[in-house]
Every structure is written in structure tokens, then in C-alpha cells.
Image (cartoon, rainbow, N blue to C red):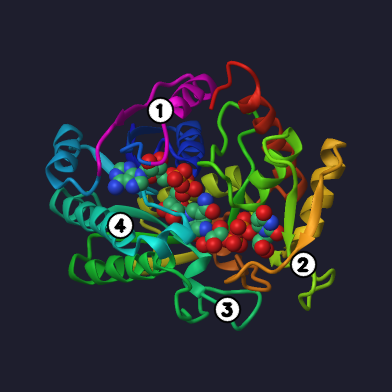
Amino acid sequence: MKKVLVTGGCGYIGSHTIVDLIDHGFEVISVDSLVNADERPLAGIEKITGQAVYNYRVDLCDYEATRQIFLDHPDLMGIVHFAALKAVGESVEQPLRYFRNNLNSLLNLLDLATEHGVDNFIFSSSCSVYGNARELPVTEANDFQEAESPYARTKQMGEQMIRDVGRAFPQLRSILLRYFNPAGAHPSALIGESPVNPALNLVPVITETAIGRRTKLTVFGDDYGTRDGSCIRDYIHVMDLANAHTKALQYLAAGQSEEACEVYNLGIGEGVTVLEAIEAFEKVTGQSLNYEIGPRRPGDVVAIYSNYQRAAERLAWAPARGIEDIMQTAWEWEKRRSAPASVS
Ligand code: NAD
Ligand code: WQD
């Protein structure tokens, strides 16, 4: 059995990845402090996969408590590190909390991984490392621009820390996965995204508006130089994203990596405007969404989308789902979590 430590396993992307890992024969141990989650996704994971996953309720900034996990599981073959604080606006207000949480947790994990010989390390990075990208689509060769927030800075710094540690400990093989805009839910609707209120990302704002948790959606600007004036993003289905982690671990385990630290973009390689996303939601659900055009949101980039060819070529990964699948599964999840005796 290939045993993997998933950090942030009760969170949105972590819980979906655990399902995909189990589906591909991995045994999973989770560690999540529950700072931004609860343990209900574990019940969903068990229903979907038939396997119970144990979660250590431990803050990864606590070195001794984290070390105990490594002592309990001397047979770990890898770590998939999702745990982080991720609210961009909050990170501007609380930079020290973001640096402390996101960087100390990573430091402890790298320290323990090298000490305990856990050689395969996958890191959740973000397209936010590119800042206001100058060339589209974005390839991994694009330079980092100035980080737009302390959150984005923690991803830039986290990537650099992993690279440097890998130079000193060549047995450590790492993969940095730069996600574009993750959205959607598992098709069973047993797990999905449960944003802390109020949701800020477009897809949960759409579904929360449609279900009546909020009265309307504001489109942040329709006067950009894009095909319909609204911003362009690359929305990637969370199950496609989840599968990339499995593929990355399999690739490392098979000794296929060419460099000690490799980096991959994960998106669908196409831009979707905000108005197109709304149209896709209305089409697949038959609901008409209450929205209005509002002012631009400060800090928004006009357009960003990925080139994911490297992941296609080396990891044999490709996204199988598009914006309509995202809207369909996000909507099924919203209906389920908003129902009486809800699962979220
Ligand atoms: P999430 O908040 O749902 O999951 C993160 C989990 O980590 C939470 O359950 C939280 O309780 C846990 N956690 C945070 N700090 C911890 C600590 N010190 N110790 C133990 N547990 C801790 O977020 P998500 O959307 O699943 O994101 C997962 C990762 O992907 C994060 O690193 C995030 O920065 C990155 N990412 C997310 C997006 C996105 O839009 N969702 C985009 C790009 C990158
Ligand atoms: C998408 C588009 C908005 C809400 C963020 C982080 C980034 C990464 C992914 C972690 C934009 C528009 C949104 C609304 C709207 N996360 N919008 N009305 O800003 O691309 O990226 O999540 O690494 O770092 O910054 O995602 O979902 O907030 O916005 O018009 O009520 O939807 O203007 O064009 P974003 P988002």
C-alpha cells in the first residue's frame, strides 16, 4: 500500500484529492487543524470511496505535534501539502498571520520530510505567483511579477524554499502545482466547496445567489478590453485538479522526474469571461441568475489563462471537464449543502 500524508485534507481541494488518491490505490492520512474547515468532508469521502480516512487535528506550525505524525507513520511515501490560509484580501489585513501560518507549516514539513526520508513532495501553488502576467497564455517559463498580496507572496516564497531545500537534500523530489481557478464539486455532491461566509470566488457566489443565500451577483466590470468586457479566467474542475496530484505522485514514485523540483500549470488552457460563466450556469441549470454590472474590483487582472502542455507531456494529465461541468456539479453541491439537514 502506498501511504500518503495529505495536509489540509478536510479542505476543498484536499478532500477531492483524497478521493482520487484512494481511487488509485493510495492509503491516505490527513492532517488538518480545522482552521478553515470541519471534519464533515471525511464522512463524504468515506461514502464515496468506502474507506475511512483518519485526520490528525494538528496545526502544522506545531513542530512536535507534526513530528508525532511522522513517528506514527514511518512508511509514508509522499506528502501532498495543501494546508494554507488562502483568502487574498484577508492576507492584506493580516500579513503576519499569513506568513506565520503558510511558511512555518511548510518549513516544519520540509524539515520532517528530510529527517524522516519522505522523498516525494507535492506543493499547492497558485497562478497568483505570476502576478499581472505579461504574456498569455501563461507558461511555467513566465517570470514572477510583483506579488499582488501577502498570500501570493507566501506561494512565491514557498516555491523558492522548496527549491532551495531540494538543492541541499537531493533525495527530496518535489512538484509545484500552480492552480488557476479551481471550481466545481465531486459528481456525487457528497463533497464540495463550503466557503466561509461570505463567499468571494465567482462560482460559489453564482450558486449562492441562485439558491437565495444572497440576493444578487455583481459582475465586477464590463468595460475591460475583452470579448464581452468582463474579466477572463481559467476555471479548472476540482476533480481534474485532484487527479493531477495523483499523477504527480505516481510520476515521482516511478522515478520519472527529470529535475529535483518541477513546476506545472494546471488549468484548462482556455479563458472564460465572467459573463460566459454566468451563461454556462444558466444553460446547465435552467435557472436565470439575478446579476448586475458593477464597478471593477481593485486588484483584478484583466485576463489570465494557462498553457498546461508541460503537465500534458510529462504527467500525462489533461483536464476532462469544462465550465458547464463545473457549473453543474457546483449547483448539485449547493442544493445539497443548502438543504435541511445539510452536509456542509
Ligand atoms: P481550504 O481552506 O479549503 O483548505 C485548506 C485546509 O488547510 C483547511 O481545511 C485548513 O483548515 C487547513 N489548514 C490551514 N492552515 C493549517 C495549518 N497550519 N495546519 C493544519 N491545517 C491547516 O483551501 P483550498 O481551496 O482547498 O486550497 C488548498 C490549497 O490550494 C491552499 O494551499 C491554497 O492556497 C491553494 N490554492 C487554492 C486555490 C483556490 O482558489 N481554492 C487556488 C490556488 C491555490
Ligand atoms: C474570478 C472572476 C472577478 C466574484 C482568486 C485568487 C487567486 C486564486 C484563485 C488562490 C474575476 C469576477 C468574482 C463576484 C465577479 N486563489 N467576480 N463577481 O480573483 O481570479 O482568483 O482565486 O491561489 O489567487 O486571487 O478569482 O473567483 O474571485 O474571480 O465579477 O462576485 O470573477 O472579478 O474576474 P480570482 P475569483
* Magenta stretch: includes residue 41: yes
Is residue 7 a member of the stretch shown in magenta?
no
Q: Amino acid at mark 2?
A: Ser
Q: Which mark is residue 261?
A: none
Image quadrant in which the N terminus is located:
top left
Q: Is residue 286 left or right of residue 281?
A: right
Q: Which residue is mark 1?
A: 39
CB contact under 8 Å: marks 4 and 2: no
What's the CA distance linking mark 1 and mark 3?
37 Å
What's the magenta region? 36-59
Q: Amino acid at mark 3?
A: Ala
Query: Mark 4 — residue?
Result: 97
Q: Is residue 19 left or right of residue 85?
A: right
Identify the amino acid type marked 1: Glu
Residue beneath disc 2: 230
Q: Image height check: is 306 above or below 288?
A: below
Ligand 2 shows up in the quarter that is: bottom right
User: Does residue 255 lie above or below 164 as drawn?
Assistant: above
Q: What amino acid is at disc 4?
A: Arg
Point 46% across, 79% down: residue: 144
Distance of mark 3 from mark 4, alpha carbons?
Answer: 27 Å
Q: In this rendering, which labeled residue sits more in front, label 1 or label 2?
A: 2
The residue where tag 3 is placed is 133
The residue tagged with tag 2: helix, strand or loop?
loop
